[in-house]
Image: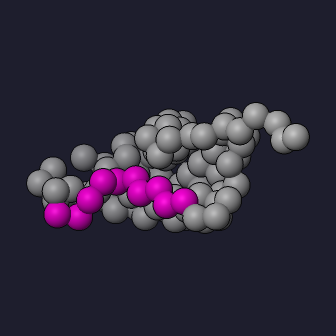
Amino acid sequence: MSGPVLSVGRGVIVEMARLAALEVPGVLRIARAGPNWRTFFLGPAIVVRTHDDRVDIRMWVIARPGANLASVGGDVRGAIAGSVERLLGLHVGSVTVIVDGIGG
């Protein structure tokens, strides 16, 4: 007999990734650069895909002016992977962070 099974909705994973990324000091916001109408054509700033027992996350962020972009990307990847694995108990396959703008 197996133990209880936890099912986590995609929206929960998206929100967990968003909150984890916003904890990183160099992140200004989670968004694509440019006007808001671009989201309609390009899609949301956080995309979650699940396959087998793994979760792949792709996120677009706007960095704070003066932030080290390589560090921001690495810190966001680590924060997302750590929180999704630790708090949701899911296995993270990949985390892709795209710094799509600075400031503003």
**Residue 100 sits in quarter:** bottom left
Residue nearest the observer in this picture, 95 or 91: 91
Query: Residue 72: horizontal and vertical position, in percent?
Result: 53, 55
> Hey, which residue is sitting farthest right in the picture?
1
Residue 39 visible somewhere in the drawing: yes
Q: Which x, y percent locates residue 104?
A: 25, 46
14 vs 100: above or below:
above
Residue 98, given in percent of the width and then of the height, sits at 43, 64
The answer to whether residue 46 is magenta is yes
Residue 66 rendering spot, x and y as whole percentages: 43, 52
Residue ID at (21%, 56%): 39
Q: Using the image, determine if residue 23 lies above or below residue 63.
A: above
**Res 70 quadrant in image:** bottom right
Q: Report the side of 76 relative to 87 (left or right).
A: left
Answer whether residue 75 is visible to the viewer in this image. no
Q: Nearer the viewer, residue 92 or 53?
A: 53
In reply to whether residue 84 is colored magenta, the answer given is no
Residue in the foreground of this view, choosing between 89 and 101: 89
Colour scheme used in the picture?
Answer: one colour
Tally the marks. 0
- Residue drawn 47% across the image and 46% down it: 10
Please report the residue visible at 82 percent of the width from the left and 36 percent of the height from the top: 3
Query: What stretch of residues is rendered in magenta?
Result: 41-50
Q: In the rendered image of this protein, does residue 93 appear above or below residue 86?
A: below
The answer to whether residue 37 is above or below residue 2 is: below
Q: In which quadrant will I find the N terminus?
A: top right
Give the image quarter of residue 35: bottom left
In depth, the one of 44 and 55 nearer the eye is 55
